[in-house]
Amino acid sequence: MASIINFIWQSIICLSFFYIFYWVFLKDEKTFVFNRVYLLVTPFLAVAFSLIEIPVSFETPSISLENTAFLKALELDSQRDIAGAYGLPEVTVTDSRLPTLWGFKDYLVFGYLVVVLLLFARFYWQYLQLKEILRKGWYQTSYILKEKYFKVPNFGLTPVFSYFDKVFWDDSLQLSNKEKKQILNHEIEHVKQKHSYDIIIYQVFSNVFWFNPIIHLMNRALVDLHEFQADARVIKDEELKDSYPKLVAKMAFQGLDLPLGSNFVNSTTLRRIRMMKANRKTNWFKVAMLVPLTVLVFGLISMKSNNSIISFNNYSTLPVSFLKNQIEAFQDSIEVGIKLRNIKNPTHYESIGKLHQESLNVQVGELSYEFTGIKNQQEYIKVLNLVETLRPNSKLNKKYENAFSYQLADQKPEPKVGWNAWEEYLRSQIPARLIEGIHMDGDLVALEFVIDKEANVVNASIKKSLGEEVDQLLLSALTNVKSPTWIPGKKDGETVAVVVNTNIKLKKSNKFKTTTNQESSNQRQTNLSNAFPENRGLAVNDDLKSGAITLGPAFKTHLLENLVFPEDNITKGISGTTIINLKTDSSGSIKGISFTQRIDASFEKEILEVLSNAPNLKPILQKNEYQLLLPISFKITGSDSNNIVPSLNNDYGDVIQINGYHVQRDAIKTTIEIPVQVIKEGLISFNGVIMPVNSGLPRLIKAYTSFHSVDHQSILVNFSAGKDIKMGEVQNVQAALRDAGITKIVFKEEEAKILNIAQSPIYMIDGILHQAPPISNFPKPENIKTLDVVSPNKLDVYGEKAKNGVIVITTK
């Protein structure tokens, strides 16, 4: 749509120049043949000039809209659903793209097509009228051999006109023979000059480009020119020279106008008479001026400077079928809605939005994920954890025209103050509250930008996002007038534009890839204290925070003594903060209860039971009714994974803290990442160990992990599959992993690194020992009769080489 609008704009401007040239230089000249060619050719030139792009090495003025905010807004607005919307309680899956309601652009295109169809329908109706007149007069038609035209009677239905090789003549005209001869000569000239072809060409142009006002003005100019040319032929006869203008004036307002024909009667009467009376010489200088002016227009429209830096986006996106299955897998562990869209020409490699009204937008490559219904901290944490999983789904690669890569530059661009000072400047532009509130794992923002020949920062984009607010502040700081200046790069001794990629470190990161629940929990609690309260607050007058009412000792004691942490939730490790919206009357008696933030239904049931017989709150300022927000935090004492938002007293008037008691584990649970790859149909690699895909796969996985004393709950599988692997095979392997007790599965585009928890075992296939047999020699799954893992106390039988385990396979 953006490119079409740009084409329309340029073609209108180009045609406007051509029409102005005609009006200034040709309109009053009697160079009728040249004028006719000019009017016929220039619409085609306007279209061609708008489509042609000629790169030049120098700067040129441009009338293009391609770099304007208007066109960029149109491009960014162009999105389409490619997988669908997913959410509880059920998942809706479509085969390809979802049907979407029409947008503004759809209505615009539809309106254009409707007008075009109506105009062509009118064009066809005029043709049928002409054909009907021809049919009625055909039997009385005569062919004039000398002038080579058909003379068709019109029985007074229309004025005299010509159409291709036919002259439609009205015998009922009350004219003298001399006047009839003048009119007939005029129409014969139209036939000889084949003016009907011009009219048809312009009629088609006017119908297709009806929105272009210039094409209609040029159409009018061409009709006038036809009349001038035919008049010039008539007044060559000295006998008719003086009387002919009077005849034109006499016939000015008679009859019906048929646009398809060349009419003797036309509204250009005065212009025709002036042209006939004009007796001046042709100004060939004015005519010659059109050549350089046309070249000038061509340069203005078609020549594009190749010094400008233009970026082209290339994408590598996984198939829609894979994305659907991935999102369905997410639904096993996350209770939010997910909407997946495709974005056209994203500015950034990725962007992570701000939580707003229970909704979070994440853009990765050309895919945009909208997570909705994020009602509590647990769901928010789970959504954030998915971002790392989403990155391989769509990868964006930007290529820049007229800019060198950093590696190819002989002299690299660098800040004049040095890299360390430049990075410190960028960090100083980020408020401490945002740095402390970063809720993504990691501490780096990856930036990409171009240092052009003038040492300006252009085409800046985010490669790795830490949140929308941080990203925008960094981008603004990059191009700020106060930003440190740069030394441009050079190639072969010449100053050139260079692409720069850099990482900005905002805070100290974890040193180890393997993270513990305790570490991640503590970090996320700090993040959530900043991320959640400002997003979940309601637009209500909080009388508790304003001091108009207090909980009072009786109400607070009642809650603390009667609210009980549900035992099932302690066992399941469910904790968090719920926020209730209370309405009371003037005495403080509760009249309404609703939940602004939810955790679990069992907590809500407990709260409602306790509040049903709670004493009145204590009013301070007299009001007819009070409305307040009250946070109630349920914390598991001794647990390392509480999802409690701290310091809520700063955001609300008071807070109720309920503790549940849980025995702390002796050791901190560690997450172990294990790669699983579907090698080919029927075979997988589980941490480098080849296993067949059949009904015994879950048992084999359990035996292998038990042999190496690995807890199933601590395993995080990095799952990958070859490009030729069918989705059904992928789903079978996922089901086997879940049957084996492994529920944490993330999808990787490339094969993950094998975790060295043990060296590869040996295989005994039909009584013969094999040390890591080739995949080609591995038995097909359907040919395997039994498959077992030898227990550790029996490994001595197989010798030293069996220290890492033995898998015994018996074929049918």
Image (spheres, rainbow, N blue to C red):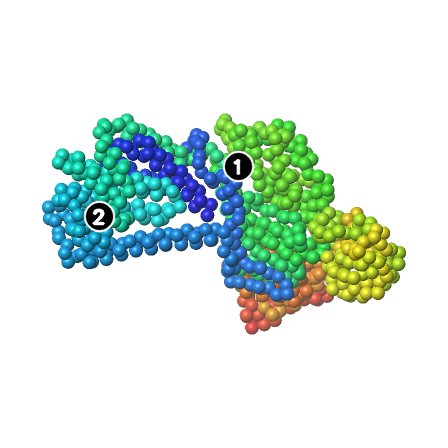
| Circle 1 residue | 405
Q: Residue at x 74, y 64 (%)?
A: 601
Q: Is residue 283 left or right of residue 439?
A: left
N-terminal label among 2 and 1: 2
| Circle 2 residue | 161
Q: Residue at x 43, y 46 (%)?
A: 4
Up-down: is 354 above or below 658? above
State the image coordinates of residue 658 (x, y, percent, origin top left). 83, 58
Say which quarter of the image contains residue 299: top left
Q: Nearer the viewer, residue 10 or 689?
A: 10
User: At label 1, which amino acid type do we have?
Assistant: Ser
Q: Residues within 10 Å of mark 2 (few under 14, many from 20)?
A: many
Q: Residues within 10 Å of mark 1 (few under 14, many from 20)?
A: some
State the image coordinates of residue 769 (x, y, percent, origin top left). 61, 64
Up-down: is 586 above or below 205? below
Q: Is residue 257 left or right of residue 338?
A: left
Say which quarter of the image contains residue 758: bottom right
State the image coordinates of residue 696 (x, y, percent, origin top left). 62, 69
Q: Nearer the viewer, residue 149 or 405?
A: 149
